[in-house]
Image (tube, rainbow, N blue to C red):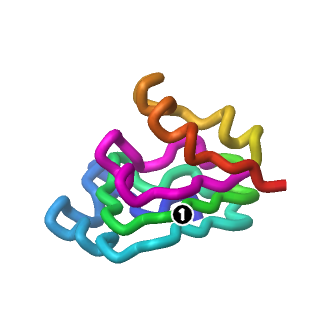
């Protein structure tokens, strides 16, 4: 699996903005042993209930679908390997600063 929420051949998402409420009750995003995973979603997603993100053995996942409004009031922890965290790509340095306090290294 390379994408969790993919795009069709024209770059359109398989879900539209109105259907993003499917994540409204998601508390934990647990991704483990997905070596081919490159993307969760191409844009930031609203996660109003998200408390934990766990990413282990997903070396090709370089970006999280987060922005400054994504789960900042509920998020408690982002767990993963330090090398993965250091190689994550962010829209800007401010976004990385927002989420860095939540990072916990998984050994």
Q: Quadrant of the C terminus?
A: bottom right
- Magenta residues (range): 61-80
Instruction: Tell me which corner region of the image, top left, top right, bottom left or bottom right, holds residue 83.
Output: top right
Of residue 38 and residue 93, the one placed in the foreground of this image is 93
Q: Position of residue 102 (x, y in %)?
A: 56, 47
Instruction: Tell me which corner region of the image, top left, top right, bottom left or bottom right, holds residue 54.
Output: bottom right
Please name the residue shown 35% across and 54% down the image: 73
- Looking at this rendering, what residue extends furthest in the right direction? 107
> On the picture, is 88 further left or further right than 26?
right
Q: Quadrant of the N terminus?
A: bottom right
Q: Position of residue 68 (x, y in %)?
A: 33, 40
Please name the residue shown 70% across and 52% down the image: 80
Please name the residue shown 29% across and 65% down the image: 14
| Magenta stretch prevailing secondary structure | loop
Please check the rendered image and state whether residue 62 is part of the magenta-colored stretch, yes or no.
Answer: yes
Classify mark 1: residues with Cα within 10 Å, few (<14), some (14-19) or many (20+): many
> On the picture, is 39 further left or further right than 105?
left
Q: Position of residue 16 (x, y in %)?
A: 20, 62
């Amino acid at each position: 699996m390379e994408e969790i929420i993919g795009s069709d051949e024209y770059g359109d998402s398989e879900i539209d903005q109105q259907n993003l409420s499917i994540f409204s009750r998601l508390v934990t995003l647990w991704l483990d042993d997905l070596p081919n995973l490159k993307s969760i979603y191409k844009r930031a997603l609203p996660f109003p209930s998200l408390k934990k993100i766990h990413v282990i053995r997903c070396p090709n996942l370089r970006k999280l679908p987060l922005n400054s409004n994504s789960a900042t009031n509920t998020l408690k922890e982002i767990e993963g390997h330090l090398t993965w965290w250091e190689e994550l790509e962010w829209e800007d340095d401010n976004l990385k600063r927002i989420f860095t306090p939540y990072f916990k290294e998984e050994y």
